[in-house]
Amino acid sequence: MTDVHHWHQRAQSLSLNTQAFINGQFVDAASGDRFDTYNPATGERLAQIASCDKADADNAVAAARAAFNDRRWAGQSPAQRKAVLLRFAELIAEHRDELALLESLDMGKPISDALGYDAPATARAISWHAEAIDKLYDEVAPVGDEALALITREPLGVVAAIVPWNFPLVMAAWKLGPALATGNSVILKPSEKSPLSALKLAELGRQAGLPDGVFNVLPGYGHTVGEALAMHMDIDCITFTGSTAVGKHLLECAGKSNMKRAFMECGGKSAHIVCADCDDLDKAAATAAAAICYNQGEVCTAGSRLLVDNAIKAEFLEKLVAQLPQWQPGDPLDPNTSMGAMVDQAQYDRVCQFIEQGQGEGSTLLAGGLPERAGPGLFIPPTIFSDLTPDHRLAREEIFGPVLSVIGFDGLDEAIAIANDSDYGLAAGLWTSSISNAIQGSRALRAGTVFVNNWDGGDMTMPFGGYKQSGNGRDKSLHAMEKYTELKSTWIQL
């Protein structure tokens, strides 16, 4: 990996797409409006981006619907769609450095993470679903000789995908891969906080051979173009990753409009449980630090509630605090940086408000605290609060920053009860040397994903999504492809 000077020099010469992408063309917003996007590590303005609204949504939906109706994409053979999407994935891989740089500049994540995970994972998600296209079969129902009963899946039509700012590329690919593979037309709405990489994806998709109108990108605000997509009467599905509050609103919009399919992947307050019989406390402590510090804690599956058996709590917390020097925030374009900047001033202020509240309510501050601003960069150090009760605000609300709440427990049953006492159910983790505890604990935890003796394990073969107010849909795996299709029953009388 090249050094920090290389990345800063490359950032200066980077060419940015700033227009919307509709029907195969980069175009200004119909209103001509634009919004600014900033580098959160420096405060510098990166670009002025087309700010789309209802008129642009109407244009994109018309293009997507025309593409779907004339079957320029859905009508291609599985092998043809597969070839285009594999080329799309290849182009993403070829442009790894540029995409990683866009991601780092736009939302503040370390360039090493964007290079090592975000860009490669984006290519992998597209190629994985491409490879699955011609390996999925429909069904023939078991009926008598008098009939032929077919059970087939067909694309939904026009899909609107609204994705968050914390993993702009990966979250887009988790939607684009299965939606495009199954023959839909897609309108991608990236967050206004990190739109740059989505616009680059549009360019690469066109180069790969996606027909005009099949893949559109509308940058802009949620209350304008996002709302227009959610309420549009000619969109068949809205898929979303983001906060629970916005997810609930989108479900209302789906119901108030045309009852479009609505799949929400929302927030989390994931419990990370360390049992007394954990046989590698050093590994568990290192993992617990990474689970709250990775991507500045701006991760929906962040292990933000650390539950530690009281029998080992003191020893474990000492090991945990010892991990934090390697997670101090720094220049995101330095390959040695492990934690970057918060995405924008609003998120920085929100996290600081939580820290301020924690410091004033009787909990024990083990590390970090309110940052001392020495420049324009939005940096917050890893912060750990101990001696919290399960009903404390810091232990219940999603903070979306590097702030860890530590709660003690006595025995696995109490840990499970504390973990499940949450509005969320996205992920949970369990460290134990007992196979019985591992199996029974993972069964008892009300979460869409349970990590045993690890955190954030998995690959494209595993579905991702949550229980309760963490959402209702699933990304990744073959199950993701199901949600972008209609199930049709055809009874042919012979």
Image (cartoon, helix red, strand yellow):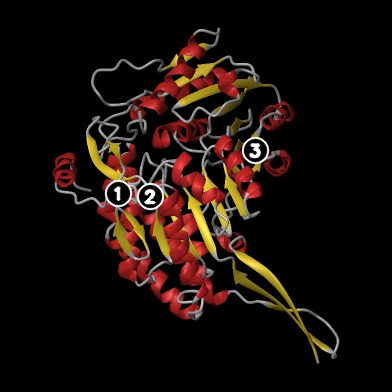
Q: Position of residue 337 (x, y in %)?
A: 29, 35
The foreground one among 384 and 152 is 152
Which of labels 1 and 3 is toward the front? Answer: 3
Q: Position of residue 238 (x, y in %)?
A: 56, 53
List the residue tagged with mark 2: 118
Q: Could you tell me which residue is drawn at 43 percent across and 59 percent down?
A: 60
Circle 2: residue type? Asp
Distance CA(mark 1)–CA(mark 3) = 31 Å
Above or below — where is 60 with respect to 212? Answer: above
Q: Left or right: 385 with respect to 26?
A: right
Circle 1: residue type? Ala
Above or below — where is 174 with respect to 385? Answer: below
The foreground one among 289 and 245 is 245
Quarter of the view holding residue 405: top right
Label 1 element class: helix
Q: Residues within 10 Å of mark 3 (few under 14, many from 20)?
A: many
Q: Position of residue 435 (x, y in %)?
A: 68, 43
Label 2 element class: helix
List the residue tagged with mark 3: 469
| Mark closer to the chain start, 1 or 2 | 1
| Mark closer to the chain start, 3 or 2 | 2
Q: Residues within 10 Å of mark 2 (few under 14, many from 20)?
A: many
List the residue tagged with mark 1: 100
| Mark closer to the chain start, 1 or 3 | 1
